[in-house]
Amino acid sequence: MKKISLIIPVYNEAENIQPLCDKLNLYCREAYEIILVDDGSTDDTLAIIEKGKGSFLKRYF
């Protein structure tokens, strides 16, 4: 099966990142590689991403 890479840039998206992660986990299974790129957020965005990395996330920067 071919893999699709989703590259999603984020910056100070703490209030939106968890719903996004939930949807990605629900709809994007094994055929997807999800890469979240944090651009130096000053809120809790990175902490929320790190918390969810085991379930859906392959890489984050």
Image: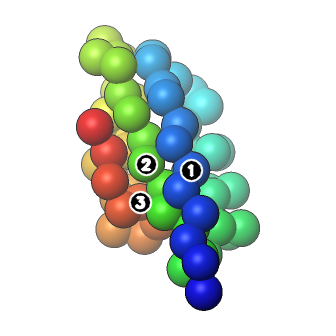
> Which residue is the site of mark 3?
57
Q: How is the image coloured?
A: rainbow
Q: Earlier in the sequence, mark 1 or mark 2?
A: 1
Q: Nearer the viewer, residue 59 or 56?
A: 59
Quadrant in the rendering for residue 54: bottom left
* Rendered position, 52 above or below 25: above
**Cα distance between the residues tagged 1 and 2:** 6 Å
The label number, if any, that marks residue 37 in the structure image: none
Residue type indicated by callout 1:
Leu
SS at mark 1?
Answer: strand
SS at mark 2?
Answer: strand
Q: Position of residue 2 (x, y in %)?
A: 59, 78
> Which residue is the site of mark 2?
35
**Cα distance between the residues tagged 3 and 1:** 10 Å
Residue at x 63% of width, y 58% of height: 24
Q: Quadrant of the N terminus?
A: bottom right
Residue at x 64% of width, y 45% of height: 19
Residue 31, visible in the rendered structure? yes
**Cα distance between the residues tagged 3 and 2:** 7 Å
Quadrant in the rendering for residue 61: top left
* Rendered position, 6 above or below 29: above
Residue type indicated by callout 2:
Ile
* Rendered position, 53 above or below 45: below
> Which residue is the site of mark 1?
6
